[in-house]
Amino acid sequence: MLQSQKMVKKKSIKLAIAVAGLGLIGTAFTQVDDYFEVSKNLDIFSTVYKEVNLSYVDEVKPGQLTREAIDAMLKSLDPYTNFYSEAQAEDYRFQVTGSYGGIGAIVKKHGENLVIDKPYEGYPAQKAGLRTGDIIQSVDGKSVIGKTSGQLSDLLKGAAGTTVVLNVNRPDVGPLEFSLKRAQVKVKNVPYFGMIDNETGYIKLTGFTPDAGLEVHNALNTLKSTGAQNVILDLRGNGGGLLHEAVNIVNVFIKKGQLVVKTRGKEKENDRTYKTLNTPVDTDMPLAVLIDGGSASASEIVSGTMQDLDRGVLIGTQSFGKGLVQSTRMLTYNTQMKITTAKYYIPSGRCIQRLDYAHKKNGSAISIADSLKQTFYTTNKRRVTDGEGVNPDVKVGLNKLSKIAKSLLKNDLIFDFATRYRNSHDSIVEPKVFQLSEAEYDQFKQFVAGKDYFYETETEKALAALEKKAEDEKYIDEMGHGLAELKAMFDKEKSADLDRHEEEIMELLATEIASRFYYDRAFVESTFDKDPDIQKAIELFASPNEYRAILAGK
């Protein structure tokens, strides 16, 4: 009996080895199959490429053909996997580091011209006196007429310490020349922080490049020393960046050793766990995190973690839903690529990725089906769901702009009026209190008179549809006169939109004008008392029981 059992055991071991061997063989076959498929398709591509290059009727550019093939291949995956040529390396470095050599200004196309859109405070452009709205005529004696904003940016960038000469035309002033010494420009992750009132601090975070965590750390320390009892962290419009900086920012508010995020990918080297490593600044101060549809990736790691750990109340609208992690790969000839290598999972275990790029419909990624979404739980057992970004605890969101306000912004009429206002005023009062007078608003109405800022209202669309239907059904002869009267009456009413939406337009003008004097600070401070998300946060801070009830899930 004992011998029989030994024989059975030996046979079992042999069978197990055989099965394992078959598994290894299967793996080997899979690898061979993959290698064959790759080799085969590269050979096909090479053959097509050579044939086009040799035989196509017109001259072709081999480099351009290859680039278009690479871009099309990567586009079939997701929007975040991208190839960067050697010439694009500087742009990619700026995306990752927020740093570049240049004059410290954003430029944009404005009609047929290229203008300064925003000089960064404390950098060469602003120090030399360049202003938003200045029309750039030439760089180092070379005309920029007809160039794109990207081409102009390339001309303005260069090694720190080198000189560049700009000739500009300043509206209502005339031609000016500026000689600037380029500097190493580092765009701040926290362009603004300050006190909204005696107890409420505010931090605006716009990026996740190196030192983002340190900037938030220092901002919160300063606010606490100023007397802040509560703090608002504004992540609206923040598209993300470096994952480890998201962990560092969480660490400002969360204790050392806390799990923040896990990443999982096809390769084991991409399976990683990230925990907080440092002593936090404050783990108890009431916290409100503002999010919207522009809050993505690293912003969602921060906001989602605060929600999962019940550390703060999220206010605003649903976030974007990007739960994918990218890594940089250096390639030949000084090229590189950014490639999606993993998905991330925040403390509750959920992945907030909203779109499924592996299963596209008509070439477009589809939202993850509700039937595939799972429920997870925060520390306090609040229910949260994966596959749909981060949902706020309190849904508010900014007020929508009127049609006329959107048109005035789109056509740069608010921008142009602010440019002229700045060029005729040496100073204004603080952004928090600056307002346009009625007389100044009348000047704006005179300024836009006769200018093109066409917009179509929903009423006009309905009226046009009614007219088309009347023509189709042969009622136009009977209804034509009445429709014409309606149109005339509506045109008259529409002309009064500048008065009807005066308060809204004056606020937009005040913010734009204040930004010409106070830069980033103005965009924030001028909206403190009108921003519904901020006002809701202040309201919650004033009601501690309601704040705690939200975090407790009651």
Image (spheres, grey):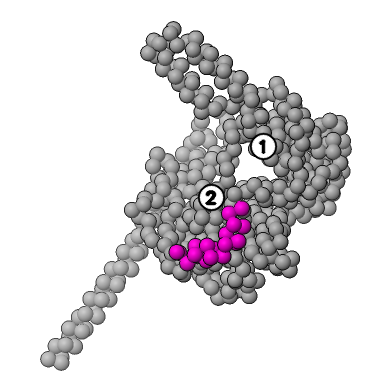
553 part of magenta stretch: yes
Residue drawn at (51%, 47%), measured in percent from left and top? 79
| Total numbered labels | 2
**Disc with the residue nearer the chain's start (1 vs 2):** 2
Q: Which residues are magenta?
A: 535-554
Kindly give the residue lying farthest to the left in the view shown: 1
Q: Which mark is residue 503?
A: 1
Is residue 316 positioned above or below 18 on the image?
A: above
> What label does residue 163 carry, if any?
none
Residue that lies at the very extreme toward the top in this rendered image: 477
Query: In the image, what residue type sits under mark 1?
Result: Glu
Whether residue 365 can be seen here = yes
| Residue 434: % across, % down | 76, 44
Is label 1 in a helix, a strand or a loop? helix
In x, y percent, where is residue 389?
48, 54
Which residue is painted at 52% across and 17% down in the image? 486
Q: Position of residue 183 (x, y in %)?
A: 80, 53
Pick whichever, 154 or 350, lies toward us: 350
In this rendered view, identify the residue nearer to me: 103 or 403.
Answer: 403
Q: Which of these two is toward me, 240 or 327?
A: 240
Q: Decide: few, some or many residues near mark 1? Use Cα within 10 Å; few <14, some 14-19, many ≥20.
A: few
